[in-house]
Amino acid sequence: QVQLQESGPGLLRPSETLSLTCTVSGGSVSPYHWSWIRQSPGRGLEWLGYIRYTGATKYNSALRSRVSLSVDTSKNEIVLNLISVTAADTAMYFCVGETFSDVWTRPFDIWGPGTRVTVSS
Amino acid sequence: QSVLTQSPSVSGAPGQTVTISCTGDSFTIGAGYFVHWYQQLPGRAPKLLIYNNNNRPSGVPDRFSGSRSGASASLAITGLQAEDEAEYFCQSCSSSLKIFGGGTKVTVL
């Protein structure tokens, strides 16, 4: 049974870069898609983007060029980077697996427990 | 930008049926994109409850059911139980974005 675990700093200053790692256990990053989703009281659940095990990505255009995802198949890890953070990026960040299918409309079927990120000066 | 609209809250007594609605538009649900539903218990990550409009993953009780009509979708919980008290989110897509509803808090009286 595939499990996900997010890790990374819980507190950042404005303008810093957020870097979070998602470790996949009990399975492989191949051949699936992996997304990052964040949740905050003000913005609700927000999809940030996905990466496929091949490295192919698609991002939420609302984040412009601030977000990037990478995958390390040898370590079974997915990494989220979000540059130039502000207080608006304060949220719970979830790593999520999409293993049902390859189609765009597939559901988010495996969720990590999430990691809380606070941006404050 | 497209949004999915859910009523903020609904309540029911144990054993009753509650229905949660999710309204999209012609760019999302109305365009034929699947609707999925998630249950989030307090302090926990969301959990997939219904996928592709009306399918239950293994382990989800059959008192949960989903439907879609036009640009809207619904989640019904029949035989409401105390453990169903949670927040429920719908999710769909546009051509370039995966989007969530604002969530509906279900209270078991």
Image: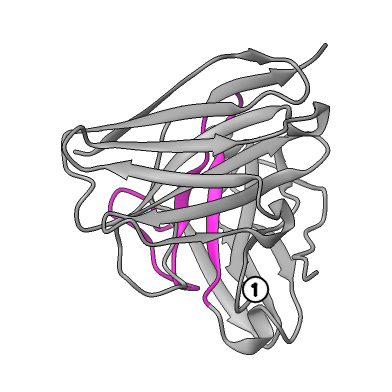
- Quadrant in which the C terminus of chain A is drawn: top right
Q: Secondary structure at mark 1?
A: strand
Residue nearest the observer in this picture, A12 or A48: A12
Q: Is residue B49 magenta?
A: yes
Residue at 59 percent across and 27 percent down: it is A18
Residue A118: x and y in percent read 71, 18
Q: Quadrant of residue B93?
A: bottom right
Residue nearest the observer in this picture, B100 or B106: B100
Q: Give the class, few, some or many, for how many residues have Cα within 10 Å of label 1's Cα (few <14, many ≥20).
A: many
State whether residue A14 is above or below residue B56: above
Over which residues does the magenta segment extend? B34-62
Residue type, mark 1 in image? Ala
Q: Is residue B57 left or right of residue A27?
A: right
- Quadrant in which the N terminus of chain A is drawn: top left
Residue at 63 percent across and 88 percent down: it is B31
State whether residue B62 is above or below residue B25: above
Whether residue A2 appears in this view of the structure is yes
Q: Is residue B73 left or right of residue A1?
A: right
Residue nearest the observer in this picture, A67 or A35: A67
Residue B103: x and y in percent read 72, 49
Q: Quadrant of residue B13?
A: top right
Residue at 39 percent across and 44 percent down: it is A70
Tell me the chain of label 1: B
Secondary structure predominantly adopted by residues drawn in magenta: loop
Residue nearest the observer in this picture, B81 or B6: B6
Q: Which residue is mark 1?
A: B73
State whether residue A94 is above or below residue B76: above
Q: Is residue B16 left or right of residue B45?
A: right
Residue A34: x and y in percent read 38, 50
Number of numbered labels in the structure image: 1
Residue B96: x and y in percent read 61, 73
